[in-house]
Image (cartoon, grey):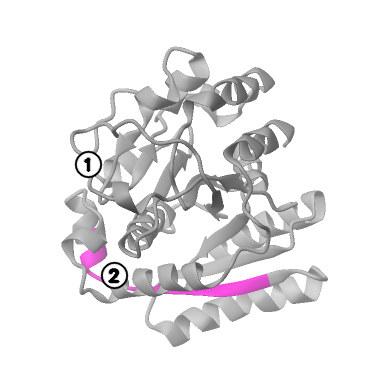
Amino acid sequence: MDQALGLRKDLKGDRPWKGTYAEPLSPVKRGVRVMSVSSGKGGVGKSNIVVNLALALDRLGLRVMLMDADLGLANIDLLLGLTPRFNVGHVLAGTKRFSEVLVAGPGNIRILPASSGIQELTKLTDDQKLHFLEMLDEVDVEMDVMLIDTGAGISDTVLYFNLAAQERIIVITQEPTSLTDAYALIKVLYTRHGERHFRIIANGVDDEKSGKMVFSKISKVADHFLDGLSLDFLGSIPKDPFIPQSVLQQKALLELYPQSPSARAFLRMADQIQRQPPRVTPGSIQFFWKRLMNV
């Protein structure tokens, strides 16, 4: 049940955004690839990967929107040193519109920030899902890719955004708990919801060979127990001292250390995503939100 969302890139308007908040956006024109990025457990560097993958796609000329869907424990804003006044919680509460919540990130990235420490947002109600749909007309966004940074684990909200996405990326490390929990997430999406296609990123490995070995471990288990499952290796991010340095400076790695080994890895992944067409033809943003309503 892969789904998508739709929008169009206008090269004539390709320029950095000024100020803290994104400027008014143009009408939707064509399809968008919607990709969720998840992990079985926290602490695997998922959000940092999402931020830099978004910037890498931006460097390739794609228009990117990043949605922080870890609704109760947001950290995209912290990673980028942003201080948004409003977030998706205000949209769900009906006090703000999408246009008032979107903020400008590095490059031309647009960010829909979440909030931290609000337990009520960890499980969306039917009314909140309906309100998302009602706010649909506010989302006049031009983009080629929408990245959804979900929470970790197998909560209803994590599953919700994975099922609404067109493509699913799972982040793993070489830690046994990371592999076990990632497999659990994949298994739930496979057995309960029929999702059969996943891409895997191995983070914090010694080199590409080590990354492929980590991928092989989860792939062998999945092939043995989940018939018909497709796991594709998107690539690996090497251990890199520049990564914690960029986190401490609250800037994207690709901004601060564009020649670092990990920065080059992100660019290779972005290029691979751009070259590989989605399995399902991108649809419209209306279709995406309606899909969210039915999850």
Residue placed most toward the observer, 202 or 134: 134
**On residue 263, which mark appears?**
2
Q: Quadrant for the C terminus, please.
A: top right
Which quarter of the picture shows residue 48? bottom left
Residue placed most toward the observer, 10 or 294: 10
Is residue 100 visible to us here?
yes
Which quarter of the picture shows residue 65? top left
Q: Residue at x 31, y 50 (%)?
A: 12
Q: Residue at x 53, y 25 (%)?
A: 137
Q: Position of residue 171 (x, y in %)?
A: 51, 62
Q: Looking at numbered disc 2 in the image, what kind of residue is underneath it?
A: Ala
Q: Is residue 83 above or below residue 234?
A: above
Label 1 SS = loop
Label 2 SS = helix
Location of mark 1 (residue): 81
Q: Is residue 282 above or below residue 271?
A: above
Mark toward the start of the polypeptide (2 vs 1): 1
Q: Tell me if 265 is positioned left or right of 245 in this view.
A: right
Residue 141 on the magenta span = no
The residue most toward the top is 95
Measured Cα–Cα span from mark 2 to mark 1: 19 Å
Q: Position of residue 272 (x, y in %)?
A: 48, 73
| Magenta part of the chain | 231-244
Residue placed most toward the observer, 132 or 280: 280
Is residue 175 visible to us here?
no
Mark 2 crowd level (few <14, some 14–19, many ≥20, 10 Å Cα): many
Q: Residue at x 36, y 68 (%)?
A: 266
Residue 237 on the magenta span = yes
Q: Tell me if 198 is positioned left or right of 209 in this view.
A: right
Residue placed most toward the observer, 289 or 140: 140
The residue most toward the front is 12
